[in-house]
């Protein structure tokens, strides 16, 4: 008879696994018996004994089981949603390859640029937004981040950009006096070097470029209203010259590239524009007056308030830019609303709509501040079939509500301003 070597056997892996399996089985059996004893004891604690409440205990068991499985189902559904990792986006049409365009918007996270982004995305195009976030905000376009048709690029256009596109909306530049005066050299670089880079890109990929120029190219005009053939009255070395002359140089560059390299260009001369997503500290007339009125601060008018301005709502401008880009007219076009207000009249209208305790105060007029500003939009009507649709005060009401929410979100809204004084018209601004 063969003798078993138990010392060797006990050291083998198979024997060790067998022992562990037996021990585990015994432990599990003991624990299950203990659990059964405990459940029997709980059942006996019912008044009348186990036999009297067997049905009640079973019903309770089924009820708890149903709740348990319902919770599991809800958790599974939540996990599925989290696994998708997708936001809910506005509905976007699917265009065929002939109609769908790849569109670059410089300054696309800014006030006007973000509204233009919305419009083009909702039309089904692929949109690339480039912004250095000097005045633009990611918040303005965050609702598109992650969408297959959208890409946000954090870059400065004073550096070359290499990308394949069909159209370029060149909006990048500080546009309000406090912002463009803050760093005048940077403003000039953006409007000259940045424009050269965008024109170079348009030349390389054979894209059409639209320059967002400005009514500031007319300076303090001696002609009223201003037509596109007016050359302007600009101080080339004044505090506003970094922007005024920067835009005039940008226009000159566009037509130089058009003449020398046959680059397809469009130029929009944009007049005062307002609406939601204006920066709270941009120092423009509309945002200043609304914020001061909502916070019961003095409404500041520089000079006597007799200077005039014309204001257009942002959705009208966006429609004009798209019409110009897709049209066949390549010379400069005014885009603005010819409804003209004195600064005092405009301040009084906003006070009436906001209410509150604000008073109008007058301060010294800035250097080179234009006395009158009103666009002649005959050319836009003729060539683009475009004109503003939103009434100025309807747009003001919408903008007041936007800033009211911004102040409420920042805990800066005084008591008494939580509700609007007027009933804003629900116009379709798309």
Image (cartoon, grey):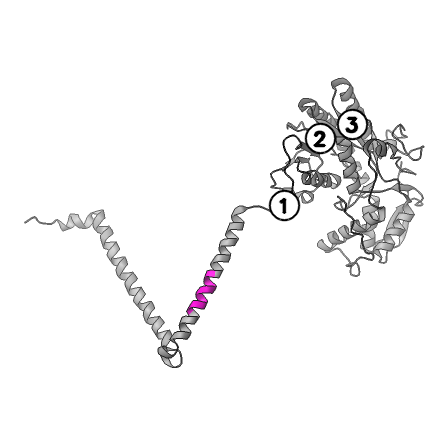
Q: Residue 121's x, y, as percent?
A: 67, 39
Q: Which residue is mark 3?
A: 328
Q: Nearer the viewer, mark 2 or mark 3?
A: 3
Does dot 3 land on a helix, a strand or a loop? loop
Residue ID at (70%, 41%):
118
Residue sitting at the far top? 260
Magenta stretch in the rendered image: 61-69
**Chain-order first, disc 2 or disc 1:** 1
Q: Which is the main secondary structure of the residues drawn in magenta?
A: helix
Examine the rendered structure and indicate whether residue 36 appears above or below residue 69: below
**Chain-order first, disc 2 or disc 3:** 2
Q: Total number of numbered labels?
A: 3
Q: Which residue is mark 2?
A: 168
Examine the rendered structure and indicate whether residue 296 appears above or below residue 85: below
Does dot 2 land on a helix, a strand or a loop? strand
Residue 216 visible to an observer of this rendering: no
In the image, 271: left or right of 63? right
Residue sitting at the far bottom? 48
Examine the rendered structure and indicate whether residue 90 appears above or below residue 257: below
Q: Is residue 236 magenta?
A: no
Q: Nearer the viewer, mark 3 or mark 1?
A: 3
**Chain-order first, disc 3 or disc 1:** 1
Q: Quadrant of residue 64?
A: bottom left
In the image, 4: left or right of 137? left
Between residue 14 and residue 84, name the one nearer to us.
84
Q: Nearer the viewer, mark 2 or mark 1?
A: 1
Q: Which residue is mark 1?
A: 89
Residue ID at (87%, 41%):
310
Q: CA distance from mark 2 to mark 3?
A: 16 Å
Q: Is residue 67 magenta?
A: yes
Q: Residues within 10 Å of mark 2 (few under 14, many from 20)?
A: many
Q: Quadrant of the C terminus?
A: top right
């Amino acid at each position: 008879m063969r003798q078993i070597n138990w010392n060797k056997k006990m050291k083998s892996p198979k024997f060790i696994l067998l022992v562990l399996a037996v021990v585990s089985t015994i432990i599990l059996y003991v624990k299950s018996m203990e659990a059964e004893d405990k459940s029997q004891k709980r059942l006996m604690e019912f008044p009348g004994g186990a036999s009297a409440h067997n049905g009640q205990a079973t019903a309770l068991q089924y009820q708890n089981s149903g709740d348990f499985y319902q919770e599991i189902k809800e958790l599974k559904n939540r996990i599925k949603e989290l696994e998708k990792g997708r936001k809910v986006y506005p509905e976007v049409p699917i265009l065929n390859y002939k109609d769908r365009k790849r569109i670059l918007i410089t300054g696309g996270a800014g006030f006007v640029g973000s509204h233009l982004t919305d419009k083009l995305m909702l039309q089904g195009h692929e949109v690339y937004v480039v912004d250095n976030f000097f005045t633009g905000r990611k918040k303005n376009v965050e609702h598109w981040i992650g969408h297959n048709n959208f890409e946000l690029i954090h870059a400065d256009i004073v550096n070359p950009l290499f990308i394949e596109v069909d159209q370029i909306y060149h909006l990048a530049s500080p546009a309000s006096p406090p912002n463009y005066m803050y760093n005048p050299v940077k403003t000039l670089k953006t409007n000259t070097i940045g424009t050269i880079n965008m024109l170079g890109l348009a030349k390389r990929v054979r894209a059409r470029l639209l320059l967002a120029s400005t009514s500031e190219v007319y300076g303090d005009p001696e002609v009223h209203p201003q037509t596109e053939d007016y050359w302007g009255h600009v101080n080339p070395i004044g505090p506003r010259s970094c922007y005024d002359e920067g835009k005039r140089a940008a226009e000159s560059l566009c037509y130089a590239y058009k003449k020398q390299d046959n680059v397809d260009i469009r130029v929009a001369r944009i007049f005062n524009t307002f609406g939601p997503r204006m920066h709270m500290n941009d120092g423009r007339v509309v945002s200043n007056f609304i914020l001061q009125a909502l916070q019961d601060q003095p409404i500041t008018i520089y000079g006597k308030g007799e200077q005039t301005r014309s204001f257009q709502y942002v959705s009208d401008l966006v429609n004009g830019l798209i019409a110009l880009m897709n049209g066949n007219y390549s010379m400069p076009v005014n885009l603005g609303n010819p409804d003209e207000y004195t600064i005092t009249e405009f301040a009084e209208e906003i006070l009436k709509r906001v209410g509150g305790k604000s008073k109008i105060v007058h301060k010294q007029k800035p250097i080179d501040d234009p006395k009158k500003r009103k666009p002649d939009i005959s050319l836009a009507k003729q060539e683009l079939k475009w004109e503003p649709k939103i009434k100025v005060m309807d747009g003001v009401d919408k903008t007041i509500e936007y800033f009211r929410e911004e102040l409420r979100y920042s805990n800066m809204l005084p008591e008494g301003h939580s509700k609007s004084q007027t009933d804003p018209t629900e116009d379709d601004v798309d």
